[in-house]
Image (cartoon, rainbow, N blue to C red):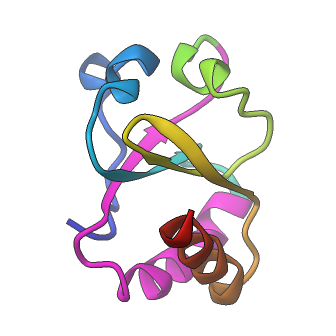
Amino acid sequence: MAYNSAFTPQDSEPSAEQLATMPGTLLLEFAAPWCAHCQAAQPLLIEALHAYPALSHLKFEDGKGRRLGRSFKVKLWPTLIVLRDGAEVARLVRPDSVAAIAGMLADAATV
């Protein structure tokens, strides 16, 4: 699964503890559907994730009352976090280019 365009339904969101036990590499995206920065980042994510077809991409709506984003200390949207075997290995806030996202993913692959 590469790019995921749909937000994970709130009643299906895993907890931070569950994410910490998931094996492999995951890309977490914290965003809001109305956020202009988030909307602008979508084509950049699509392009950057073409090189990582096996990477799992989980997209979470963030905002007031949403605990998962707070547990990852998300303050601005979109925030991209790469977890490997439950541990954070990379983070990018408000990506503005394909190169920025690709660089984060490449760096995370070598950690």
Residue 62 against residue 36 in the figure, above or below: above
Q: Quadrant of the N terminus?
A: bottom left
**Residue placed furthest toward the front:** 111
Residue sitting nearer the eye, 83 or 4: 83
The residue shown at (71%, 47%) is 77
Q: Is residue 44 above or below residue 22?
A: below
Which image quadrant for residue 38?
A: bottom right
For image coordinates 57% across by 81% down, the residue present is 44
Q: Which quarter of the picture shows residue 106?
A: bottom right
Residue 94: image location, x then y, percent: 76, 61
Over which residues does the magenta segment extend? 37-64
Give residue 21's position: percent from left, percent from top.
31, 25
**x and y percentages locating residue 28 in the rendered image:** 47, 47
- Compare residues 17 and 9 and report the one nearer the observer: 17
Queried whether the magenta region covers residue 63, the answer comes back as yes
What residue lies at 65% left-to-right and 80% top-to-bottom?
103
Q: Residue at x 33, y 69 (%)?
A: 3
Between 22 and 38, the one nearer to me in the picture: 22
Could you tell whether 36 is left or right of 34 in the image? right
Horizontal side of 19 relative to 43 (left or right) equals left
Number of numbered discs visible in the structure rendering: 0
49 is within the stretch colored magenta: yes
Q: Quadrant of residue 49?
A: bottom left
Specify the quadrant that holds the C terminus: bottom right
